[in-house]
Amino acid sequence: MGFSAGAAAEPQSLLAGKLPIHSEGVKDPQRLTDGLYSNEGDEWLTDVTSRFLTARSFVEYDLGADQTIRCALTQADNNDVYNLSGSLDGVSWQPLWRVGADNAAGMRLRNQKLEAHARYVRLSATGGDALYSVAEIALYSECPSIWPPELVRTRGVAVADTVNTKVVIFGIFALFFLLVHRRTASRIRYVLVLPVVGAGWMLAGELAHLYPFFEQEPALRALLAALAGVLALREAFFKNAEPHPKLVLGTLGFCAAMAFATYTHFGAPQFFDEAKGRHTLVNTWDMRQYFPTAKYFRELRFDGLYLASLAAYADDHPGLGADRLADVRLRDLRDGQIRTGRELMDEMTKVRERFSPERWQEFRRDMRYFADAMGEGDYLASMQGHGGDATPAWILPAYLLFSHLPAGEGTLTATALIDPLLILLLFFVMARTFGLRVMLYLAVLWGTSDFSSFGTNLMGSTLRQDWLLALGFGVCALKARRPVLAGVLLAYAALARFSFSEAALFLAVPVLWYAVDFWREHQRIPRFAELRSAQRPALRAMAGAAACVLGLFLLSGTVFGVGHNWGAWHEKTETYIDAPNANNVGLRTIVAFDSNSTAGSLVQRQVPNLWGEWERLQRGAFDTRLPLYYLALALATALALLACRARSLEQIVVVGLLLIPFYSYLPNTYCHFVFLVPLAVSLSGEQDERNRTFALAVAMLAVLAVGQALSLAELWNDMRYTDQSVLLLIGFGWLLIRLARESWRLSPLWKKDRDQEKSDAPAVPNAM
């Protein structure tokens, strides 16, 4: 198959048409010897290539007899390394050819002349990005006269395109069924569900064959979000043709379960362990920062992580050499500057002296795990990050969790389950608090609203969504009329991630509105007794928040000492908190945007020091547009404050969340709070209108999720997150305007407006 007649006189591959006698972790191994090669630069995973799932995957062939091997070629993914081994007995193997990586992108042909003998040959993969694929392997006892020989090439159909096409087909059938189905329709219309089931079955089969399918998850998230958004609009705006409630719950349940599965990557390990040569569930890049920071905070404080890491690495690798160690580039966490090991030798010694001999040996053992799992290149490169920048409020519980645990795959896999289990608990509490239907919508949005670069997220990390959980549980506590607990939870969220302080601060908004309205009616400030009588829930929540803040400050100071606590954290984060970052989203990202200073345009102009120049231009653009920035802040704040009138306390807190991307310059992964936004809308009182607002909020976030999936096609991070910032700010701005208008109608500021409203709408008691 695939060989031209004109090439018959030339030596044929010893493997032509052969099937492996043994393969492990290799999909479609028959493609390796079918004579078909991809075009150079094609996608790595197509209908022409065979996928090697792990670094332990391999194929073995029997050549039938001892054969001389003089020439070999293979076409494989560019950035991986492949090993060809030979054996005479199938037991003892000798290396024949190490197929190195290629700098060019996509599928690339590599060839080698050899002088070897073997009856059995084995091909395996290693290194690179752990996404391995091979189109062909060929061995020759005599080299063809033209080397490398002429090959039969074809343009492979990318698996991603095939899957995405089936996602679209399934989505069209499913959306059509949701749109035409009505509760009172004839049962014959249920026949329309058959194409949905058929297309879903084909899609499931394709995904099962492809598993794991990280690159296909964005399309799945977009589809699930679209289904939920359409269903919400159908429920709210087509009352005369509403779908059957069981269909609604069934569809939402399916979408919620699938959204959770896509967020957790269907259980597939996505991080590569260099030492073990396989994927694991441990997010080593993230936990390499946060595990040692928490466990050894007494010694490392906020400035010693990288210094101690490099010192420990030098102890474990005495052959590294003084020059190599001195040339390692790492971030000095005292001022945020990148320096070399040579410049920081004295500081490394000082940090090491903070450890007792026993603690130093324990630190070395823990960091050895991360160094081995990440490999030398990634481990040393990770020292240019910003270190474990969590607040003492986060470090305190993490310290208690990690203090007696060794770093290792088992430990960090087990602790990484804490976050998803707590998320499931949050959804259970939300169902009890807000109802099953609302919870399912929020669960879909949680799983599909994912501001990520490469399909990954914080799965595999430990206690990295504690702030998000605290926000969610806090809103539920307010709805359940447990304001003190809610205040504690919202304050913890604010202290764990300072960018989320708006939720806790908005606990004071109903008190302020009450004081304003009281002054306008009575021409005096309300007495405390009057304030307490009218605003007891808000005041109790504020008291809980104050107690949490005071308690965490005292407790963290007792455990870690006052001198290396909150003040030190502030000094550290001040060095980079406002620095331009391509992965950040929000109002500042939009205000600082300039089409002439994008990373792509700077590359085209061959500007040296690309990201340094990009950062300088971003700062300049932002500084010149500060009036515009402050105007947008003032407008958003005014709308949010107005939107709080005539809303319950839990809704007011969520309205505060809408201001986060306006005030904060957030790393993309921290925008996951958006799934809580629909809770800013009441589902009682003006039922129809507020149900429509709820549906529109869900639909808006569904559009955002679809836009996020589409934005991943953008190669440059600065453009990707600018696009996502635009979507986020447009959606949040529109919702603030709608909520403000609704609140103005239900609780007008001026008496004249109130008198006019009496004949148009029933009185709605001010929930403040």
Image (cartoon, rainbow, N blue to C red):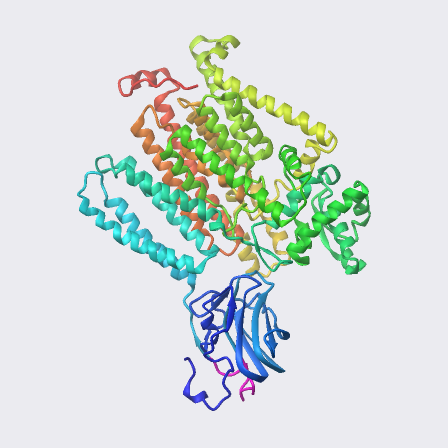
Magenta extent: 139-151
- Kindly tell me whether residue 2 is visible in this rendering: yes
Q: Is residue 443 magenta?
A: no
Q: Is residue 742 left or right of residue 302?
A: left
**Quadrant holding the N terminus:** bottom left
For the point 27% across and 21% down, which residue is it? 760
The percent coordinates of residue 590 (x first, y second) are 50, 44
Q: Nearer the viewer, residue 539 or 21?
A: 21
The percent coordinates of residue 240 (x first, y second) are 21, 35
Q: Nearer the viewer, residue 87 or 54?
A: 87
- Main SS of residues in magenta: loop
Q: Is residue 144 magenta?
A: yes
- Kindly tell me whether residue 448 is visible in this rendering: no
The percent coordinates of residue 272 (x first, y second) are 58, 56
For the point 45% across and 87% down, which residue is it? 7
**Quadrant holding the C terminus:** top left
Q: Quadrant of residue 120?
A: bottom right
Q: Nearer the viewer, residue 754 or 140?
A: 140
For the point 63% across and 32% down, which residue is it? 393
